[in-house]
Amino acid sequence: MQPPPEPADSPNTTSQVRDLLSSVEDDEQDFKNLVQPLCNPLIFSNKENVQSEEQFSKLSDYFTDRKRIEIEPYLMPEKEFDESFLTTTKCVIKVKYGTTFQMKIEYFDEEQLQNQLFELVSLYQASEETESTYIFQEMKERAVTSLKAKLSILTEYDEERFKNQLESFKSPEDIKLYEDIKTFAGKTELHIGKGINATEDRLALRAILKDHTRQQPDNPMILRKQIAAVKSIVVYVPSKLLYGGKEILDMPGTDDSDPLAMSFIQDALDTVDVVLLISEYAFTIAGQEVKDTLKTSRFIKNWMQNSEKYKLMLLSYTEKTWQLGKNDLKKLQKLFEQENSKRQKEMSELSKLIHPDSLSQSMKDNTITSRVLPVLYTSIHAMQGNAHEIIEENEDYLKYAGIDQLITHLDAFIVQRNTSLIKEIEEKISALQNKQKNEVTEDQESKNGTSSQSTSFAQESSFLKKNEDLFSGVKKKLEHIITETVEKKMESIFVKFAQHAMKRWTQIGNRVNNPGIFNPQFYGKNPLFKDKLYILFDDLDKEMSPVFETLIRELQAALAEYKSQAIALFTSELDGKRVNSHTVGNSLEHALTWHFGKTRSSMNEHTCKLTFEKHLKDSLKRHLLEPAYKDGIEHTKRKMGRHIKNVLSAVRTSFLKDIISLCNERWPSNLARFMVRACNPLISNPKSQPQGCTFCGDIKCSVCFYIESSSTFKSSNKGTIYIIQDRLNCASKNVIYLITCKKCSAQYVGQTTQSIRRRFVYHLSTIKCKKDLALPKHYNTADHSLQDISLMVIEQVTNESSILQREQYWISELNTLKPSGLNCIN
């Protein structure tokens, strides 16, 4: 059972807001105050753009009449060739599924912008005699051009003045940015479509996207500054192709990218599962910078180690120079016949790329080489008439276009990667069918008078206490296993790896003569330099893999032992009174599966690996790169051994803390209640439920987390105990309910004609949003939280018109008006 959903989980919350909230570390912030200032509606104002959209209806002319058609991009910005370093934002644009057109823009903070510009100091000061040995000259020219452009936009320095003051720039903080940059630096913008007219939302978003990715001479100065400070852009599109968690990363081209853009490409290639490398003719003649970028990426390493879980697609897009139409079937057939020969050449080039490693059969099987003709494919589908007849008539053209095959490959790959999810769904369907069968059996037993007796509320509390004691022990054991693994096994590996890292440093240390190599913006992977500092810790994750395997195996063993003990406890207590160990075992299995499951942040080896990589990256930045970038080369070289030890020590500490926290989050703290509820399945015959307030029987119910299961309730002020006369749970309607604070025993009486579940979710929302109401004020005071709420349904009112009178009766009877309680006078 999970605690109630945050506002991010509401079905009315947009995709970008949910993504934003998932990245917020301080979850105590007020939802409204956090999100509202960031939100901007997509406003469509240019009606002429709608008319230009009619050009899409002429797409069929491309195929039928071989006509070139000049149309605006559907959504993504197109790149111009003049002033290339100013025309396109040097960030990866992520495209995700959203219920409406939406966009999220994040900006670099001031420190990050200063770090970027400070590199210009080292580039101007670099000695031309020696820099060729450690700097890529072509990349340097791009870097200088790009940074000069940024400098002129973000600061008051011109190039000549900046060069004259080089000696005064001792650290990034010495570069002063324009004051108005503070208005957006480090912040996030959310642009949200209304969802009423998809075309207008898309065009409005396209305009904003274009404004933030291309410097125009007539752009307002503040917009030029924002463009220069863009860190990331996420676009949400209501497209079926993206549904189910798929994401597309649109990267800058490698041929004219500066170091910052190249670092974005490298970071993206470290995270993706599929790479579509699109070239005009073939991968064989692709630029060397493209091949080098792919070769050094984590994607290619992952693909080489486990190619079945990754896919490399080498696609050629010939429509950039060739136009193929209705009468070109023979040309298409000829191109298709050349594919085998072309694939052999592509495989040969790929073998050269990964040399000295060899290209295995599995790698070949998971490398797609194909020619794609998307304009031809789209043009045929844009034809007017009976869709089935058009597709059937042009079947060969569509086959040679290659798009259907590409989508088939991607769908098959996604299904393969989601086999665990499919299995989980199948198991849930099976469990639901079994549950229905059990309910039929229970109904029959109830009619025959042979059904199991219900356990009393006193016994239920006893179960809770015994199992909570059992759970407390296993929780301590889990933390002990994690601590022992991290402190001992990780420490021994780190001691050896520190020596290994120092050995690597001695190999490159003499060539490190420019502080730019320590620029924390690049996390040790500055594309400008031939030597990369991340290699000091490269392969450390491989060394840690056996540790993660051992950790998860020992945690699973400890939880399996707890499961056996809990089943034995409940079977013993419930023998002859309720369901057997199978019921309890299923509920525990549900919790264990969720704990070690395949969902995001699950407690498994993959999560351990990602968490470790994150902490290693952050520690490298904080304990080596940032100090070195400020202290200078010689000072850093003298202390490199200490820096390496500090990095590894910080990784161990932060990783241990994070994994213990993750383990506690993934393991349901209210598991005892979860299992008791599993022993109280949904009752098809309400009369068989004992009088009192108990759980509803729905294992996904978020309100049962707060329900106090009992046949009586007590007045905190009077000490009087009252008997509940009805059979009640959180699904009951037309009820009076009682909220009691576990910390200070303060009580609140309320009524609702809706289900208590729906009413209570509203209360939770007001508390989280810190509304100016009695309950939010109380549970947002010091030392109070949602965990201190106890909920009981105390009476069901048969006559809806008298529900307010019964509410006033219980407010008076329990004396819950302020200051004695939490109710206010209406």
Image (tube, grey):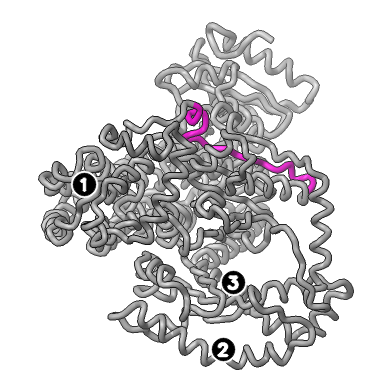
The one nearer the camera, 449 or 268, is 268
Q: Residue at x 79, y 50 (%)?
A: 49
**Residue 459, image quadrant:** top left
Q: Is residue 203 left or right of residue 436?
A: right
Identify residue type, mark 3. Asp
- Mark 2 or mark 3, whichever is nearer to me: 2
User: Does the magenta run of residues contain 791?
Assistant: no
Which residue matches tag 2? 339
Q: Residues within 10 Å of mark 3 (few under 14, many from 20)?
A: few
- Mark 1 or mark 3, whichever is nearer to me: 1
Task: Where is residue 492? Give x, y as percent.
Answer: 13, 56
Residue found at the very far top of the displayed protein: 819
The one nearer the camera, 173 or 142, is 142
Q: Residue at x 30, y 53 (%)?
A: 612
Task: Report, in whole angstroms, how far the alpha carbon at label 2 lies from the one at label 3.
Answer: 22 Å
Q: Is residue 226 left or right of residue 165?
A: right
The reply to whether the C-beta atoms of the residues labelled 1 and 3 are less than 8 Å apart is no
Task: Where is residue 510? Give x, y as percent.
Answer: 14, 56
Identify residue type, mark 2. Glu
Which residue matches tag 3? 411
Q: Which tag, 2 or 3, sits closer to the chain's start?
A: 2
Task: Report, in whole angstroms, how far the alpha carbon at label 2 lies from the one at label 1.
Answer: 50 Å
Q: Which tag, 2 or 1, sits closer to the chain's start?
A: 2
Residue found at the very far right of the displayed protein: 385
For label 2, the SS is: helix
The one nearer the camera, 496 or 735, is 496
Which of the labelled discs sits on residue 112, or is there none? none
Q: Quadrant of the C terminus?
A: top right
Magenta range is 180-197
